[in-house]
Image (cartoon, grey):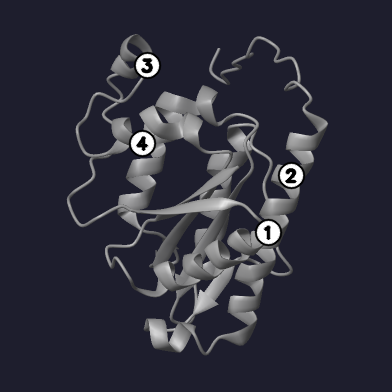
Amino acid sequence: MKVLLFNGSPHKEGCVYTALQEVAGALEKEGVESEILWIGTKPVSGCLACRRCYEKGHCVLEDGVAELSARLDEFDGFIFGSPVYYGSASGQICSFMDRLFYSSSAKLRGKPAAAVVSCRRGGATAAFDRLNKYFTISQMPVVSSQYWNQVHGNSPEEVRQDEEGLQIMRTLGKNMAWLLKSIHTAALPLPEREKPAHTNFIR
């Protein structure tokens, strides 16, 4: 079993990374592999609504989304981490996830997921809510912790002083490992999916 931890911060080893490291350590103790993937600092395009992913099976823009889409089968669970910008997740991670989830939702369905956010002081719950919406629309079980998955601090050093935040990260890792093991043990097929019904409110 393996979990992808996605660092959606422009800082490779900043506050988000510090939080994800704590989750990764808890996963390792539970016998679950993990990989931290950094979004980087290059521009990430928003979705162009070209729908070429319907033809190709992946996003056609070349900034990392298609590369991750090709690797999704390697992972059993996902954790997406973001800094808080003006009470929301970073623009980079939102653009990335918009396109990843739109083009590759079939590969994500049924796999446990969680969000992690980092802020100096406020806006964490709004950013956390934004990220969780990707999972709930994609039929992914959402993994919880003992509180909302957030850490506080303006630097990695300050995050390491957030004892409650780090404990929340460790609990998240343990809960993710427990759910993955439970799913693996049960080995049940995914629920049969009905044909999607799309209702528009303009007649």
Residue 125 visible in rendering:
no
Separation (CA) of disc 3 from disc 4: 13 Å
From the viewer's side, name the closer residue of 19 and 29: 29
Q: Which mark is residue 68?
A: 4
Asked if labels 4 and 3 touch by Cβ distance under 8 angstroms, the answer is: no
Residue, x 23% and y 40% (percent of image)? Answer: 45
Q: Nearer the viewer, mark 1 or mark 3?
A: 1
In what element is the residue under mark 4? helix
Mark sitting on residue 57: 3
Q: Residue type at mark 3: give it.
A: Gly
Earlier in the chain: of badge 3 and badge 4, it is: 3
User: Label 4 amino acid?
Assistant: Leu
Upstream in the sequence, badge 2 or badge 4? 4
Question: Of marks 2 and 1, which one's residue comes earlier in the chain?
Answer: 1
* Label 1: how many Cα within 10 Å (few below 14, some 14–19, many 20+): some
Mark 2 lies on residue: 181
Q: Residues within 10 Å of mark 2 (few under 14, many from 20)?
A: some
Helix, strand or loop at label 1? It is loop
Q: Which residue is mark 1?
A: 30
Going 29% across and 65% down the picture, which residue do you hit?
12
Q: Nearer the viewer, mark 3 or mark 4?
A: 4
Q: Are marks 2 and 1 in contact (CB under 8 Å)?
A: yes
- Are there few (<14), some (14-19), or many (20+) residues within 10 Å of tag 4? some
Total label count?
A: 4
Q: Mark 2 or mark 3, which is nearer the start of the sequence? A: 3
Do callouts 1 and 3 mark residues in contact (Cβ within 8 Å)? no
As displayed, is residue 47 above or below residue 39?
above
